Amino acid sequence: MITLFHRPKTRSSRFIFLLEELGAPYELKEVTIRSSDGSGAIDPDNPHPHGKVPAIRDNDTGEIIYESPAIALYLTDKFPKAGLGPTVGQKGRGAYLSWLVYYGSVLEPAFISKFLNTPVPRGTAGWVVVEEAMEHVIGALSKTPYLLGDTFSAVDILYGTTFAMFGQSPLLPKSPVIDGYIKRIVERPAYARAQAKEGAQ
């Protein structure tokens, strides 16, 4: 059993989607978080070191995992039969790890820099401007329907739900490739089930 520490309409929502895709046993534990407007507070029941979401607890081992790429990797390794991430030794594992880390180390910092209107420190940081990062993503998705080729994986949940969230925002460069990608992700039955479960909270 996996416990997902969750706040509706945040990055933790996509892990309901992933858990539904995996067919994994899970429970949702809604927690409070600090909001950008100054409201809210850290929930003492949330094991994330900074009181953020998402975080999960593997109730089989007692382990706590946080940060979206780490959670995605942990869950797909724990539930390999779902085929949502190549396992160690399988073809595509390197690309899978690269896309997971690229998300947290390059893409999210790029979006945050653009949102805060902060210049990216060229040559001294591991990320680039949004337009350069998205050129790389669009280049990959121009060749295949998903980031690992013809196979949907957990990386598509991270990227697709982020792009869906930013779909009408000037943060995301307009692209018919990305529009089509978002559509493929949000039309999945597990996405609809996740939205229904979040709405029931």
Image (tube, rainbow, N blue to C red):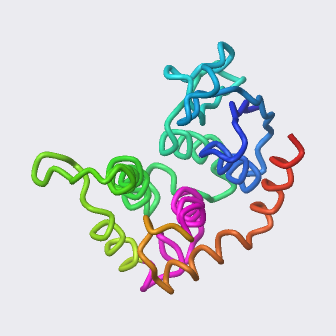
Residue lying at the far top in this picture: please name it. Answer: 44
* Front-most of residues 92 and 54: 54
Please state if 44 lies on the left or on the right of 107 as rendered. right
Please state if 170 lies on the left or on the right of 52 as rendered. left
Q: Residue at x 44, y 58 (%)?
A: 96
Residue 123 percent across, percent down from the top left: 10, 52
Queried whether the magenta region covers residue 89, the answer comes back as: no
Please state if 114 lies on the left or on the right of 162 as rendered. left
Tell me the magenta residue range.
141-167
Q: Residue at x 80, y 47 (%)?
A: 198
Residue 61 percent across, percent down from the top left: 65, 21
* Position above or below: 160 against 119: below
Q: Residue at x 40, y 47 (%)?
A: 104
* Position above or below: 152 against 193: below
Rendered-image quadrant of the C terminus? top right
Rendered-image quadrant of the N terminus? top right
Q: Residue at x 74, y 73 (%)?
A: 187
* Front-most of residues 55 and 1: 55
Queried whether the magenta region covers residue 150, the answer comes back as: yes
* Position above or below: 184 against 80: below
Q: Quadrant of residue 24?
A: top right
Residue 143 percent across, percent down from the top left: 42, 85
* Front-most of residues 62 and 114: 114
Residue lying at the far left in this picture: please name it. Answer: 123
